Amino acid sequence: MSTDTRTEIMLAARATVQAHGYNALSFRELAKEVGIKSASVHYHFPTKGDLAAALASQYTDEAAAFFDALRESTQDHAQRMATYTAVFRRALENNNRMCLCGILAAEYDDLPAPVRVEVDRFIAVNTRWLVEVLAERQPRLKAKAVEAQALAVLAAIEGAQLIARGREDLKAFDQIIAAYSAAGLFG
Amino acid sequence: MSTDTRTEIMLAARATVQAHGYNALSFRELAKEVGIKSASVHYHFPTKGDLAAALASQYTDEAAAFFDALRESTQDHAQRMATYTAVFRRALENNNRMCLCGILAAEYDDLPAPVRVEVDRFIAVNTRWLVEVLAERQPRLKAKAVEAQALAVLAAIEGAQLIARGREDLKAFDQIIAAYSAAGLFG
DNA sequence: ACCTGAACACCGTTCAAGT
DNA sequence: ACCTGAACACCGTTCAAGT
């Protein structure tokens, strides 16, 4: 049994946005990939904003589930952080793509409000997870400081992805992450 | 005497790209702002890629000149780094804009080759400056490690800008930069 | 319930034509 | 040297019409 049209649209759209961003997403191109007409895409997602919001929402849900499982699977701090950064590495491995919400953040001013809400939620989900993991490691640190460090870790990883994708190989990403780790940014 | 048309086009285009990115730049909108027709914009810049490449080239030249002057103006490492990060803060202060090459990096896969070249050059100019400044502070560090740290600093700052622009105030940027500094990322 | 063709106002780009 | 109108193939969106 083949996946339904709505799912096919979302899969194709997600790949495009992770590679080229929101503005580069075309309903006509998308329709061609899925084998329907662009007007039919609008039946499933009335506007481009609706589609992007659905993508970001799904993406954030998946990330939240994975991160929760990761926290349960091991207590080892270095292992947790290594797996966390590996998630962002995987996007680059997959045809030089970026974190969906990272690339959407770059277009923040162009995004319809519902998409912004989901991008904000992705950041919140990541920050919350990092706060818990970092606080466990550094129990003496003030809540404010942990919060700042968590946001800094996410920002640094997104930045590493941004800079690394313009390069030939994944080594740039690995080197940058190693530099963060060496500096002690990951707690 | 008023600035010439070419300069006016570049000024308007730069503001738009720093706020909305390459894909959101419209020759017709641009023409309206400058008071000419879109076909006339093509007279000055044959393609959108030509315009973006000119913008990025100018931007990188200005950055290179500023950074060179900064290195001459003070030997104090903390002062140098504070002024360096302040440059990226200023973009956010200016109507929530981003570093021109940072936002272009997010659209890297969509960029015409000549634009990519200029984005790469911006990264190279920044990395070179950071390598010199960081090496002066940490003379015992291996060249490879300094190179990685320099790229990490740039990536981290670009990431901070990316994350911070979705928030209400500049405090997020400042907090992230403070967290980098506290971790020792800036040497 | 799902899809379509046709229309609308947009877009970058080209080009012959104007001054 | 600099600008323009008109054309081309694109775009998101809407809507009446089909099954």
Image: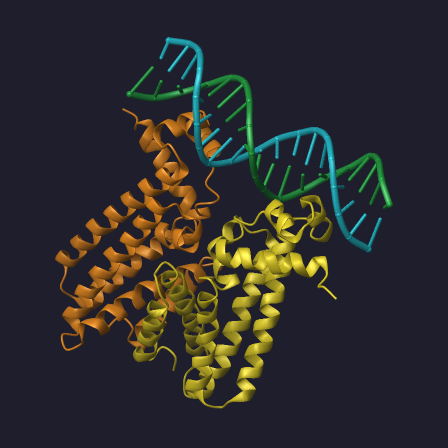
Chain colours: A orange, B yellow, C green, D cyan
Provide residue B160's location: percent of width, then percent of height: 38, 66
Tell which of B45 and B6 is nearer to you.
Answer: B6
* Quadrant in the picture for the N terminus of chain A: top left
Residue depicted at x 27% and y 52%: A121
**Residue nearer the viewer, B111 or B17:** B17
**Residue B39 to residue A28: above or below:** below
In the rendered image, the quadrant that contains the C terminus of chain A is bottom left
Q: Position of residue B142 (x, y in %)?
A: 43, 81
Farthest residue to the bottom: give it: B75
For residue A181, which quarter of the picture?
A: bottom left
**Front-lying residue, B133 or C17:** C17
Q: Describe residue C17's horizontal placement relative to residue B119 as left or right.
A: right
Q: Whole-percent x and y of residue B123?
A: 52, 67
Which quadrant would residue C3 be assigned to in this image?
top left
The image shows residue B79, relative to residue B61, as above or below, that is: below
Report the label total: 0
Task: Please state if B16 lies on the left or on the right of B181 as rendered.
Answer: right
Give how far across and how far down residue A90 sits, in percent. 34, 53
Residue B168 appears in the figure: yes
Residue A92 visible somewhere in the drawing = no
Seen as rendered, the residue at the extreme front is B1
On screen, residue A51 versus residue B32, left or right, reads: left
A184 left or right, relative to C4: left
Q: Is residue B157 above or below residue A34?
A: below
Residue in the picture at 33% in, 67% down: B172
Residue under the image location 64 percent in, 59 percent down: B10
